[in-house]
Image (cartoon, rainbow, N blue to C red):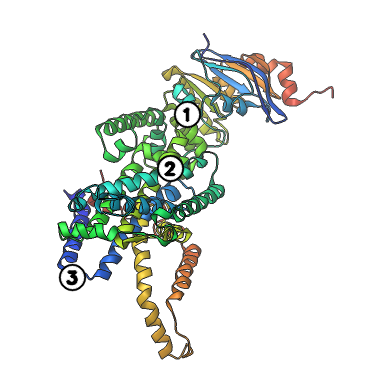
Amino acid sequence: MPLLEITGLTQRFGGLQAISNFSFQLEDHELVGLIGPNGAGKTTVFNIVSGFYKPTEGDIVFGGDRINGLKPYQVTAMGIARTFQNIRLWNDLTVLDNIRLARYSWLNYGFWSAVLRLNRYRQAEKAVETKARDVLEMVELSEYAEELPKNLPYGLQRRVELARALAVNPKLLLLDEPAAGLNSTDVDGLVRHIRWIYDECKISIWMIEHQMKVVMSLCQRLVVMNFGCSIAWGTPEEIRENPDVIKAYLGDETL
Amino acid sequence: MQRYAINILFGTAAIVLVALAQAGILDKYVLTVITFMGINCIFAVSLNLVNGHMGEFSCGHGGFMCVGAYVGSLLSVAFFTNSKLFGPALFAPELAHFLFPLVLVGASFAAALFGLIVALPSFHTRDDYLAIITIAANYIIISIVENIDAIGGPRGFSGMKRVVNSMSDAADLPWMLIWTIIGLFVCVMALYRLMTSTYGKGISAVCQNEVAAEIMGVNTNRVKIMAFMVSSGLAGLAGALYAHVYGYVNAQSFNILKSTEGLVMVYLGGMGSISGVLLAAIAFTLLIEGLRFIIPWLNDVLHAANLLPASYELSQVWKWVIIPLILILLMQFRPEGFLGNRELTHVFPRLKRWITFR
C-alpha cells in the first residue's frame, strides 16, 4: 500500500482551475521530486496535501486514512510536515523555541497545568526539550539554539525550518523549494542533510525543486506538472529526455 | 536563595506597604493611588497578552473590565449584604474577608466568557477589522449594562462599600490594598508562566506567523480563544477590584476612554514585555496623579513670569492635552516603548540571577 495516494485531485479557485485531475502515488521510504514551470500548481498541491485548501474534487489518502478536509494541525499530527518556499519561521522566538513549538500537537497539558506548573507540565516540557535538542543536534544547529532566526544567515534559516519540520516526527516530509536562494556551498550542505535525513530517519520525502543539480542527485523519481496536470513521470534520466517535458519548459517550437 | 532575591524584595515591599497603611502613615489619598496603580497594572498586562503577545489590536478592553466590575459588585452584594435586589445575605458578612476571593474568581470567569464575543470572530478576522469588532464589543457591553434597570442602569450600582466595611469590621486591615497586591501577583505569575511554556508560546507563534503556526500543529482557533479569555478574565479581575475600591460602579467609566488608557500603558511599556508594561502602568498612574499638582504649580510659575494673562487660569483640563502630547512624542521618538518587546531581564541580563517565576 502506498504511503500517499492522490487520485483525481481537482482544485478550482472561482473560475480558475489550478489543479485538474492530478493523480500521484508515493511509496514508503521514497524520495520523489515534483517539478514544473512556474505557475504549474506545484505549491497548490502541497497546500492541499497539508490541509490548507479543501480540494474541490478528488481524494488524498495517507497511510490508509482519507485526509482531505482535515485542518492543517490535524494533518501535521498524522505525520506530514512541510517547509515553505519563502521561509516562515517565528522570528522573535529563539531557534530552540521554534523547534519546541513543532511539538505543539503532542502537548498533553493545558492552561491550568502551565500556570500551576503541575507535574504533567514539567514532564511534557522535559520531553519537548529533549526532542528539540536532539533535532538541532541532527542538523548541526545546536550552537544556534538561543539565537533568533532573523539574525541567522539565509542558509541557516532554511536549515532551522528543516529541523522544525523534522521535530514533528513526520512519515512524509514536503519540501517546497528547499534550495531556493542558497549559494552553491549551502546547496551542497542541504543535499547532504536531506540525504542523511532520508537514510537515517527512514521517512519519505516529496520535494519541489528547480535546481536540476539537487533534483538529479537526490530524487529516485520525478513527477512533472504543467497547467495543473501531471504531464510525465519517471526516473530523472527518463524525464530529461521526455519531449513533453522539454516542450513544457522550452515551449513548442512548431508555434 | 539568590534566585528569589527580587521576589523576596517585592514580598517585603508589599508587607511594608500594608504595614504602613495599617499604621496610618500613608494617608487615604496615597493609599488609593497605590491601589489604583496595582489595578492599572493588572489591566495593562492583561491587555498586553492580546495586543503585545498575540499582535491583535484590541481597543475594547474596558468592556471586559466593566463585566468584571459589575459581576464582582453583584456577587459581593448578594453574598455579604442584605439588599433590595437579592434579599438577605447568602453568607454572614463577617465571612466577607475569607470569601472575597470567590467574588474575584466569579468576576474573572464572567469576564472571560464575555471574551468570547471577540474570540469567536477572531477566527476569520484580523488586524483593523478585528479592532473594530473589539470596539463594538466594548459598546455592546456598556449598552447592555446601562439598559438593565435592576442594577441601576445609567445611574450606576453601589453597595460594595458595605462589604469592604464588613471586612474591616471583622479584621482591621487595609483589605482592598491586600486584595489588589494578591490579584496583581496572581496575574503576573500566571501570565509569566503561561508565556514561558511551550503551550503559551503558541500565542507568539500565531502573532509572528499564523500560517506557520497552523501548519506546524498549533490549533490556532484554540489559541485565540485561550488568549482572549485569559486576557479578558484578568481585565475582569481588575474591574472587580476597581469596583470595590471605589464602592460604586458606572458603565460609562469603562467606555472607550478606559480602553484607550490601557492601550497607552501597553504601548508606553513596549508590546509583549510584561515587565515593561508594569513599569508603564506605574509611570502612567503617577503621571496622571502628578499632573494634579504640576498643573497648579505651572499656573503659578507662568503667572509669576507674566507669561499668562491674569484673567486666564490653567485648569486640570490641560491634563488631556499634556498626556496625548506625551503619546505623540513617544510614538515619534520611541515607538517601541520603554523596553521594546524585551523583558527587563533581557535588557539587564544580570537580573536573571536574582529573579525567578518558576
Task: Return the residue at label 3.
Answer: B25
Which residue position holds label 2? B204
Distance from disc 2 to disc 3, alpha carbons, whole Å, reads: 44 Å
For label 1, the residue is A73
Residue B292: give x, y in percent of width and height.
37, 75
Residue A11 quadrant: top right
Q: Residue furthest top?
A: A1
Q: Residue at x 45, y 33 (%)?
A: B219
Element on which disc 2 rests: helix
* Residue placed most toward the observer, B77 or B86: B86
Mark 2 to mark 1 CA distance (whole Å): 17 Å
Q: Nearer the viewer, mark 1 or mark 3?
A: 3
Chain hosting mark 2: B
Q: Tell which tag, 2 or 3, sits nearer the viewer.
A: 3
Q: Is disc 1 in contact with disc 3, using a CB cutoff of under 8 Å?
A: no
| Residue at 36% over, 31% down | A132
